[in-house]
Amino acid sequence: MASIDHQAELNRAGAQAGGFWGSLAYLIRRYPLGAAGAVIMIAILLMAIFAGWITTFDPTTTNSRASLAPPGGIHPLGADFMGRDMWSRIVYGARISLAVGIGATTLGCLFGVLIGLMSGYFGGWLDLIVQRFMDMMQSLPLLVMALVMSAALGPSISNTIIAISIPLVPTVARVIRSNTLMLREMPYVEASRAVGMNEVSIALRHVLPNTLAPLIVLGTAQLGSAILVEAALSFLGLGIPEPHPSWGRMLSESAAEYVRTAPWLVIYPGVAISLAVFGTNLLGDALRDIFDPRLRH
Amino acid sequence: MAAHVMTETTGERPAMDAAAAIAAGTDAPALLNVIGLQTFFYTRHGTVKAVDAVTFSVWPAETLAIVGESGCGKSVTALSLMRLVPDPPGRIVGGKVTLAGTDLLALDEDTMRSVRGKDISMIFQEPMTSLNPVMTIGRQIAETLLLHEGLSRSAAQQKAVEMLRLVRIPEPEQRAKEYPHQLSGGMRQRAMIAMAAACNPKVLIADEPTTALDVTIQAQILEIILELQRKLGTAVILITHDLGVVAETAQRVIVMYAGRKVEEAPVDELFARPLHPYTHGLMASIPRLGLMRGEIERTDGRLQEIPGIVPALSNLPEGCAFAPRCVFAEERCRKAFPPYEEKRPGHWAACWRSRELYGAADA
């Protein structure tokens, strides 16, 4: 009979995981892809925060002599046709992407949660009207809706955030509503009623905190699509205006004319967008596995 | 019976069962009076008379048990007292519930909220799901105190720890910081009791508090409820289908069947000489060791059950609701509902034939 290595079995089950670092080590071993996603996102975040320290050029300063400089030398990733340093623009572009992505996701989640919670908890005609309105908003795909919104609002960073957040609202509201419908029937909600708590307090203090796990999962997943939609909007010239470096617009400026002569102008922003979306998706999937008890073990 | 513990005496003496007063051995006014309570559910299949014309009183510091099968209206009675019947489809359509002189059914929702948890509170059946999984035990208990006692956050937290100690949870300071999933079922039910009793309510309704628990834990939980009752002078309404629990804890018992009260008596009297065939049936269906060994009259060693099932409350028979299942039922039982009468001092029942069957009058 094969002998069982008890220690190895325990390790595999994560029995050693103790404290923050222990749990972290366990999670990394259990969800290596999620950990990779987290590493990518942390790297992009650090890049955005310390942008000034890791670049030598200003992302908006033009230099005619460096126009279309190939990668290497003082321009590690080359320079665009206006002689702007690609590395600087990619690094500062992370700021824009994250600001728009996180900003739009937060805003969308905030309103989505509020609407979903109200609609699901109080129900009745309010629910009916709100849900039909959400249906209407969802009849257009995220990108098309964001396109319409940003065209109406005009290009600026804050308008882009708003334009992307609006189509996120119904998605979030849906998820929160269906969770709320289940949670409001929980015995602890009735128990809170029995101690004399009012309905608004119950909704905010007992139902809302219980929707946070699915919200985190959803928010992470939406962060990726928000970043992608920002890139798409900017690519179409509707998102982030000049002179802010946006990965999407960097693509659109160079794609048509320079893709053959100076491919680095297209490759690096493309890689940056892909990595950011890839990272959030990996992280989001892992978070879903961790938070969804039905998928646990 | 500690009926004199009563602190609040209401001016007017409300209408009450004379029998109940005798049973409680006191003239003191009752704490809680329920008169002709009717709670109906309006459904697609018609009107479900979940609670119909139920009348009872509860005196301070006593334990009143309400027993009956599933679906007999015990829990709806409890929810009606709290005014927590889900509406729609449920509605309290008639009757009066007065707690220490206040008509609970006449209060507006805001005032009722200030009564719930403070003057009247409730322990639910499922300890596993009656606590919010993302909130610490201590905070959930403190929340009740914040609502009603106007304590500061830290004072409420301290009182919560005290309550946990009172329900005999070991290391209450530590447990208060823990989440429900870190506690066992018995511990959670104790935490629920602590939450319900935190504001020192006048009436504590325990709706099947031990049903979901391990047998070894059940006795402990009941003991804790009774201990709290002794310490705080709370009146307890114990809702259960377990006659063993009733015998151990209650002073008076109400037997409900199909939404109506069919019998009421002091606990010893009820167990010694039940007057309703339904109560007889309930008692005969308790497993007994002697029965298994064939020492008791029914020697086939089988557990005796009540034939049939509880009738649909939306379609009750015309006469006595128990008649279709009653072996003694005769013509008049099926024609008219039997009057609810005092058959012996303090012992009330609604049965046409109790006199001839069980010799009620001779007692």
Image: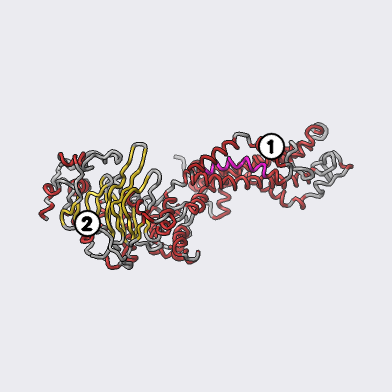
**Label 2: which secondary element:** helix
Nearer to the camera, B329 or A71? B329
Give the percent coordinates (x, y) of residue B199: 40, 63
Q: Nearer the viewer, residue A138 or B213?
A: A138
- Whether the magenta-drawn stretch holds residue A184 is answered as no
Residue A213 percent location from the top left of the image: 54, 47
Above or below for A169 versus B265: above
Position of B198 compared to A248: left or right? Answer: left
Secondary element type, mark 1: helix
- Kindly indicate the quadrant of the structure image that contains residue A151: top right
User: Which residue in the structure is indicated by mark 2?
Assistant: B267
The C terminus of chain B: image quadrant: bottom left
Q: Residue at x 70, y 39 (%)?
A: A152
Nearest-to-viewer mark from 2 and 1: 1
Q: Is residue A153 visible?
A: yes
Residue B65's place in the image compared with A84, above or below, is below
Please name the residue shown 39% across and 56% down the image: B107
For the image, the number of numbered tags is 2
Picture coordinates of residue B4 (x, y %)? 27, 68
Q: Chain of mark 2?
A: B
Residues marked 2 and 1, same chain:
no
Q: Does A168 lie within the magenta span?
A: yes
The disc at residue B170 is: none
In percent of width and height, residue B77 lies at 32, 50
Image disc number at residue A147: 1
Which range of residues does the magenta coloring cover? Answer: A162-177
Q: Amino acid at mark 1?
A: Leu
How far apart are the alpha carbons under marks 2 and 1? Answer: 75 Å
